[in-house]
Image (cartoon, coloured by chain):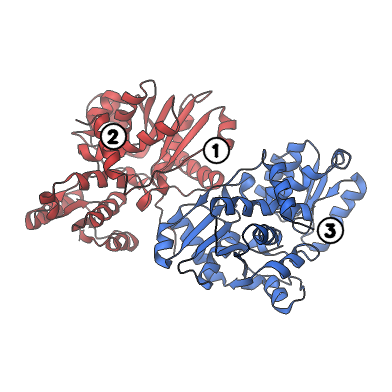
Chain colours: A red, B blue
Amino acid sequence: MTDLAAIRAAAERIEPHVHRTPVLTSRFFDERHDTRVFFKCENFQRTGAFKVRGAFNAVLSLSDTEAAKGVVTHSSGNHGQAVACAARVRGIPAWIVMPSNAPTPKQEAVLGYGAEPCLCEPTLAARESTAQQIIERTGAHFIDSNDIPEVIAGQGTATLELLADAPGLDWLVTPVGGGGLLSGAAVAAAELSPSTRVVGAEPAGADDAFRSFTSGEWVPSVNPQTIADGLLVSLGRNHAWPIIKRSVHSIVTVSEDEIVTALRFVWQRMKIVIEPSSAVAVAALAKLDLADKRVGVILSGGNVAFPE
Amino acid sequence: MTDLAAIRAAAERIEPHVHRTPVLTSRFFDERHDTRVFFKCENFQRTGAFKVRGAFNAVLSLSDTEAAKGVVTHSSGNHGQAVACAARVRGIPAWIVMPSNAPTPKQEAVLGYGAEPCLCEPTLAARESTAQQIIERTGAHFIDSNDIPEVIAGQGTATLELLADAPGLDWLVTPVGGGGLLSGAAVAAAELSPSTRVVGAEPAGADDAFRSFTSGEWVPSVNPQTIADGLLVSLGRNHAWPIIKRSVHSIVTVSEDEIVTALRFVWQRMKIVIEPSSAVAVAALAKLDLADKRVGVILSGGNVAFPE
């Protein structure tokens, strides 16, 4: 069970290792929409994404005995780098399972943190069985990217900071993929700012959270198609989904064109580099009643593959 | 004559209208080079570049009688937008002379500030004669982009802020094109932080400041070739050059490849959007002895044309 106390404990635990990211505003956006938006810049976070919050909280929560055997996860993206980074800080081995077609820079990033990339076939089944083999061989502890309380509490620290820097939010929007960021936000806001309506933003081409929320029953992500590659995974069923079902106000979906338009706006006008998954939350703003409101948006990360 | 008092007066004059931009650091860069670099983020400045500092100072320094007839300048880039913005705030007309092949977004940006883009042939002679015709017709006041004391004092306010936020700099690096930013930096540092060595960074393909500095005689920019399109203009001969000759430590040139590498570093690692002219200053860092030093870099702007 993740509650505000767990998020506060996570904040204390990870504080020496993660950045307190800045909150930016855009006069242009605010004037155009008669609103006040506070952008929480997790693109400036260590490793370039909010994922280090949950990864550090999970890795630092292990007992010394558990930690000694190392950690394992499967992710070719931000969570993989985050776990590798946290493991290095704790001084324990890390195995990061990633598909054999993962881009070289992503493998190099993991190597750069002293972790071991473990390549497998690009299917969920192969990723899971490869991770399982490593666990059996090494006794390493598995760090799920979303669906464990330590990760949800860690991601909730982003909202803790945002609500401190921008109190009295009417809306709080985060992207939703596996649901760690959104469920953490919902837990933090529910206690700290109950009048804040927490909204998940999802690509229409990967709308399992929307369909779960609308039907009231968890459904998996099947054949998702979106440039927001951080949001392809299914909603975490055991921990993230029950929180989202209970505490989130709504899930808003956006088209690929809307994502690109939002991406372009942030790069061009705000002069910061965000990844498409972050732009999903910005795109969702157009679907909300913003007039005269105070709005928080979590820009989840800034890891983009630039052409060589 | 531009001195620290003029820069302080400029700072007070423009304060209500420009942003106090943040100073960012990069742990990655600092650890790799055993240094401490402070990046002054003028890419987050109003209109996306430091140019509003000088433009506001110049436009606000006009008497009411002078101002009533409006202002004119020739620039298809950041200075044109800056003058248009300052004129709108002062409530006076502005004519921005730009070449007929200037991209539509640049014309629209000027229009967006309520100023009038005046298209001419893409030559310096045509720009100057078009501006002259407007002056004769309207009595408008010409706001040079670099070579007037009000602009130099205005640009110097960026260094005033940087030295307040990051005192005790060993090096201070700015790009040099027309020389307004560099000469303003040199004036501010000479009085506030005499031990700071002020360095101009210039593309090797547009190295008139380097050649002027090396020979001791002003030489114009002839057929410059660089992606750093903000640095094509000649060094301002009457005001900027004498200051640079007297007070700047050195001019460092960088290749186009070095500019691109620096641009990529800032976008990828620091997650902020800068324009190539800013990357010139970052590229120049590789030519300096950084070990154990405190280094200031002015990231001059972030206006990049994104593909549609």
B8 is higher (above) or lower (below) than B91:
below
Which residue in the protein does label 1 denote?
A: A26
Which residue in the protein does label 2 denote?
A: A8
Q: Is residue A274 left or right of residue B167?
A: left
| Amino acid type, label 2 | Arg
Q: Nearer the viewer, mark 3 or mark 2?
A: 2
Q: Quadrant of residue A11?
A: top left
Which residue appears farthest toward the bottom when viewing the image? Answer: B215
| Chain under callout 3 | B
Measured in 3D between alpha carbons, the distance from the residue under mark 2 to the one under mark 1, in whole angstroms, is 29 Å
Q: Measured from the top left, where is residue B174 in percent x and y? A: 61, 62
Confirm whether circles 3 and 2 share one chain.
no
For disc 2, the neighbor class at 10 Å (few under 14, some 14 to 19, many from 20) is some
| Chain under callout 2 | A
A133 is higher (above) or lower (below) than A24:
below
Measured in 3D between alpha carbons, the distance from the residue under mark 3 to the one under mark 1, in whole angstroms, is 36 Å
